[in-house]
Image: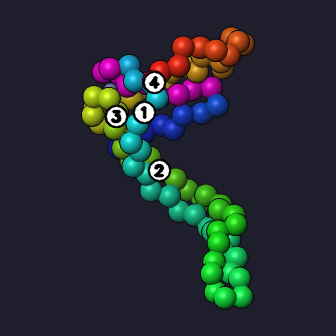
Amino acid sequence: MSIAAPTAETRWRCTLCGNLTRFDVTRSSRVTDFLHFNLSGESKVEETQVLSETIESVRCRWCNAVDQVELVARPGAEEAPEGDAQQG
Ligand SMILES: [Zn+2]
């Protein structure tokens, strides 16, 4: 089962407890990294290109429910001013 990722207009909400802010996300991704090595052989990832990504499960940090999230509209997605009630 895969979970839909939040977008610019949506975010996750736990359907059981209403948590909007804290989730453990297990995902698998296939990426291409641009590794930049210095002369001593240390490497640094300078660029990461995500080729594909699948969210495998999302666990609520508040109530531990697994895959019980729904996508809801972000408060500022339409035209609402910022400053909505933030959760812990
Ligand atoms: Zn929850």
Q: Do the residues bearing badges 2 and 3 touch, measured as CB atoms within 8 Å?
A: no
Which residue is labeled 2 in the image? 54
Q: Answer with left or right where residue 63 lies relative to residue 86.
A: left
Where, by quadrant of the figure, is residue 20 drawn? top left
Q: Residues within 10 Å of mark 1 (few under 14, many from 20)?
A: some
Q: Answer with left or right where residue 87 lies relative to residue 69.
A: right
- Point out the frontmost of discs 4 and 3: 4
Question: What's under tag 3, amino acid-wise?
Answer: Arg
Distance from the alpha carbon under mark 1 to that under mark 2:
19 Å
Which of the two labelled residues, at mark 1 and mark 3, occupies the earlier sequence position? 1
Q: Do the residues bearing badges 4 and 1 touch, measured as CB atoms within 8 Å?
A: no
- State yes or no: Cβ of the residue under disc 3 lies below 8 Å from any atom of ligand 1: yes
Q: Do the residues bearing badges 1 and 2 touch, measured as CB atoms within 8 Å?
A: no
Element assignment for label 3:
loop
**11 magenta-colored:** yes
Above or below residue 17? Residue 28 is below
Distance from the alpha carbon under mark 4 to that under mark 1:
9 Å
Q: Which residues are magenta?
A: 9-17
Question: What's under tag 2, amino acid-wise?
Answer: Thr
Question: What's under tag 4, amino acid-wise?
Answer: Gly
Which residue is labeled 1 in the image? 22
Distance from the alpha carbon under mark 1 to that under mark 3:
5 Å
Which residue is labeled 4 in the image? 88
Q: Residues within 10 Å of mark 3 (few under 14, many from 20)?
A: some
Assign the C terminus to one quadrant of the image: top left
The numbered mark at residue 69 is none
70 and 26: which one is in front?
Answer: 26
- State yes or no: Cβ of the residue under disc 2 lies below 8 Å from any atom of ligand 1: no
Q: Answer with left or right where residue 31 lies relative to residue 18.
A: right
